[in-house]
Image (tube, rainbow, N blue to C red):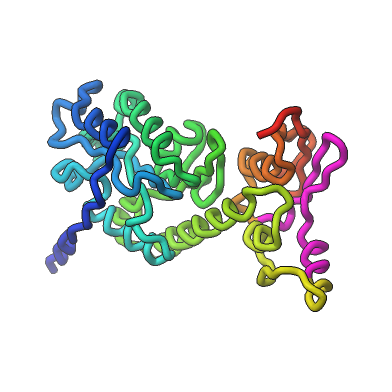
Amino acid sequence: MTAAPPAPVRAIPRPPAPSGPLAQLHRDIRRCTACPLAATRRHACPGEGPERAAVMVVGEAPGYDEDRAGRPFVGRAGQLLTELMEGAGLSRSRVYIANTVRCLPPKTGGSAEPPQEAVEACRMFLEREIALVRPAVLVALGRAALRALVSPKLAISDAHGRAYTRDGRWVYPMYHPSYLLRNGNDPALRRAFEDDMAGLGRLLRVHAATLRPRWSLEAIAWLYRSAPTPHTPNAHSRATTWHVLERFALPQVDGATITWDIRGVHEMFRTPSAIQELLRRYVGRPVRLDLTNSSLRRGVRATILAGTT
């Protein structure tokens, strides 16, 4: 029996053209010849999306459709990414989308993972793009993006769906949507994608709710695994408010020392960089996390440093 052909690729609307420094960066990317991929590409692919965006998605490299169009994530993987984002309530039109490498890499053994030489050549473009777009959250899709944005020592199978920080920004790794396509849209794997996308929504809410010291009940509700509906305390809800604060332990400050029982904190935030960033936000001062006698399963200890953020 002959297999059904893949569904045709639907056109993804082109966002408005950038202006100013971002437009100049796009021109620089299209003219780049810094690595051998420039000799075999059809088009280099700058990022696209709003010039200021709360979420910036960073993939690995362009594929066949992207190389032809000169745009990121417009092929089957791009369609799936758009579908998953919109299913989680995040419109593609509000997201800036780019790649770690801007030119189509050759396939080696069935894989098109970008060579390290190209990753290094494109690094300055990615750094400039992040500085101009100023996202609150960087979504790292796949191994190459994870290595470029967080650490070359991490595996995407361990890091996906967890929160990290880099230069004061959240980094949220996910599997690349092409991984789901290569596995025949496996239902279990798709659920993992959908769970990670829902986690992105949680991360955005925690980011917004913890920007100021002395977290609100809204911050508590999203930061912990489960919590009652947040509300503003009043004469009729004071007992419920006390129950929330007793059930979900907040960081405790004693002079320059801060301790935090994190047993109720959602697993996605239990990385050293995420815990340190949350503590920094809680006290409004830089902190140094001490993991010598701490456990990311039970409790952590940190020192409040001199100076202000």
Residue 253 sits in quarter = top right
Q: Is residue 98 left or right of residue 227?
A: left
Q: Looking at the figure, which quarter contains the C terminus? A: top right
| Number of numbered markers | 0
Horizontally, is 41 left or right of 276 in the view?
Answer: left
Q: Using the rendered view, name the quadrant where residue 107 is placed.
A: top left
Q: Does 107 sit left or right of 142 as displayed?
A: left
Q: Is residue 81 visible?
A: no
Q: Is 97 contained in the magenta span?
A: no
Q: Which quadrant: the N terminus? A: bottom left
Q: Residue at x 26, y 38 (%)?
A: 46
Name which residue lies at 72% across and 58% down: 264
Rendered residue at 56%/39% (across/down) = 165
In the image, the segment drawn in magenta is: 241-265
Residue 263 drawn in magenta: yes
- x then y, percent, for residue 15: 25, 52
Q: Which residue is at the far front?
A: 20
Q: Looking at the picture, does residue 142 appear above or below residue 233?
A: above
Q: Is residue 15 above or below residue 309?
A: below
Among the 4 quarters of the image, the one containing residue 67: top left
Q: What percent of the width, then of the height, locates residue 30?
A: 20, 32
Q: Residue furthest top?
A: 34
Q: Nearer the viewer, residue 5 or 142?
A: 142
Residue 171's x, y, as percent? Answer: 50, 43
Nearer-the-camera pick, 97 or 269: 97
Q: Residue at x 39, y 36 (%)?
A: 132
Relative to 141, residue 108 above or below: above
**Does residue 132 appear in this view?**
yes
Q: Residue 61: x and y, percent?
A: 29, 39
